[in-house]
Image (cartoon, rainbow, N blue to C red):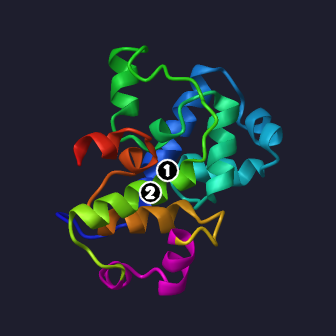
Amino acid sequence: MNLEFDSKEILLVFGANVRRAREMQELGISELATSIGYDRGCLSSLEYGEQNVEYITALNLARKLNVSFPVLFSRNYLNDLANDNTSFSGNFIEDDFLLVFIENFQRVMKSKQLKQIEIYGATDVQTAMISRIINRKALNPTIKTLYAMAYTVDEEMYNLFSRSAIQEEI
């Protein structure tokens, strides 16, 4: 990796993308929070990168905002929206994004000839948690945990959550 691991980075990206999508739809923060059964204060903190969020909550946000789930993790989402509202106009499509993430993660590991033991030492995530995610035993990991895994293989979360991005690269 080029930069030192900072789990707050993805929370800032995710939160800013959620806020922008919410504002574009003219949804109030209380309205969005209530619609997904989430605390308004926590959603506010999330939008400013101060709140970690679980996978299912992130999925519910994408679903309610009707935006492509992977796009919420794109560092380019805000820039492209400012320049052209159609760049990321993909609507939410139901998928098992956690499974897509795991499959893409494993493809990247294989292509870079990384062993699971190497992944364990690269971040502060417990080895058991990474193993549980890879083996589909943990079905609702936090975004910070998934970001730590993405960091270890030097891949953007947007790509790991996208069904075709990794397959085309490898």
Front-most of residues 95 and 62: 95
Q: Give the number of marks.
A: 2
Magenta-drawn stretch, dominant element (helix, strand or loop): helix
Q: Residues within 10 Å of mark 2 (few under 14, many from 20)?
A: some
Q: Position of residue 5 (x, y in %)?
A: 31, 69
Residue at the image position 39 percent from the left and 32 percent from the top: 77
Q: Which mark is residue 100?
A: 1
The reply to whether dot 1 and dot 2 touch (C-beta < 8 Å) is yes
**Label 1 Cα crowd, 10 Å radius (few <14 / some 14-19 / many 20+):** some
> In the rendered image, which residue does mark 2 sit on?
103
Instruction: Please state the extent of the stretch shown in magenta in the rendering.
Output: 117-134
Say if 102 sits above or below 33 in the image. below
Residue at image point 30% right, 79% down: 115
Identity of the amino acid at label 2? Glu
- Residue 65 % position (x, y): 65, 30
What residue is shown at x 64% (from left), y 35% (from top)? Answer: 94
The quadrant in which residue 153 appears is: bottom left
Residue at disc 1, secondary structure: helix
Q: CA distance from mark 1 to mark 2?
A: 5 Å
Q: Secondary structure at mark 2?
A: helix
